[in-house]
Image (spheres, rainbow, N blue to C red):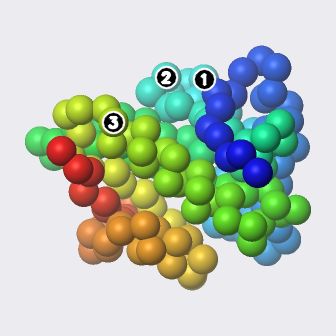
Amino acid sequence: MTISLQDITRDNWRECIRLKVADGQERFVAPNMFSLAESKYEPDCIPTAIYDDETMVGFLMYRAADYGLAKVWWIDRLMVGAQYQRRGYGRVGMELLLERLQATPGYAAALISFVPGNDAARNLYASLGFTDTGEIEDGEIVYRLRLER
């Protein structure tokens, strides 16, 4: 098992939109088709696939943002396809993304949000070192991770 992050391209975008979350999770994350459309109209968004060897198993999207006086990374999406859940792909995908973000100088933190009631997301983000900011953004709870300098 070799997990990697790869760009979404004209060669794999259809594979990305075929990935769906498990039944009952649809209220927690936007469909990948919406996210890819958003990335075309919001050019700061970076859509990224999570691969296990040659198989796309999940999706991440992130962007650079200003947050007060600081530059931060905002992680807009994390999803793992229903058939690949509970195998650690979300955690490893996030760890790889955080390594990438920490390697870019000048950013104070990474921010991520989740729908109240999404305990799996809350637990994952907390275990990665994210903490609750006490803020709500578009009805979602915002967590923050200070990036190493």
Closer to the camera in the image, 138 or 36: 36
Disc 2 and disc 3: Cα gap in Å?
21 Å
In this rendering, which labeled residue sits more in front, label 1 or label 3?
3
In this rendering, which labeled residue sits more in front, label 2 or label 3?
3
**Image quadrant assignment for residue 66:** top left
Q: What residue sits right under mark 1 in the picture?
A: 40
Task: Tell me if label 1 and label 2 are in contact, CB under 8 Å.
Answer: yes
Disc 1 and disc 2: Cα gap in Å?
6 Å
Observer able to see residue 29: no
Amino acid on which disc 3 is placed: Ala
Q: Which residue is situated farthest in the front direction here?
A: 1
Task: Tell me if label 1 and label 3 are in contact, CB under 8 Å.
Answer: no
Disc 1 crowd rating (10 Å Cα; few below 14, some 14-19, many 20+) is few
Q: Secondary structure at mark 2?
A: loop
Residue occupying image coordinates x 58% and y 30%:
39
Q: Which residue is situated farthest in the top direction here?
A: 10
Residue occupying image coordinates x 49% and y 45%:
97
Residue occupying image coordinates x 79% and y 41%:
53
Residue occupying image coordinates x 57% and y 81%:
119
Q: Secondary structure at mark 3?
A: loop
Closer to the camera in the image, 7 or 66: 7
- For marks 2 and 3, the one nearer the N-term is 2
Q: What residue sits right under mark 2 in the picture?
A: 43
Q: Is residue 125 left or right of residue 71?
A: right
Amino acid on which disc 1 is placed: Lys
Q: What residue sits right under mark 3 in the picture?
A: 103
Observer able to see residue 3: yes
Disc 2 crowd rating (10 Å Cα; few below 14, some 14-19, many 20+) is few
Q: Secondary structure at mark 1?
A: helix
Task: Residue 6: give x, y in percent of width and height.
Answer: 65, 32
Disc 3 crowd rating (10 Å Cα; few below 14, some 14-19, many 20+) is few
Disc 1 and disc 3: Cα gap in Å?
25 Å
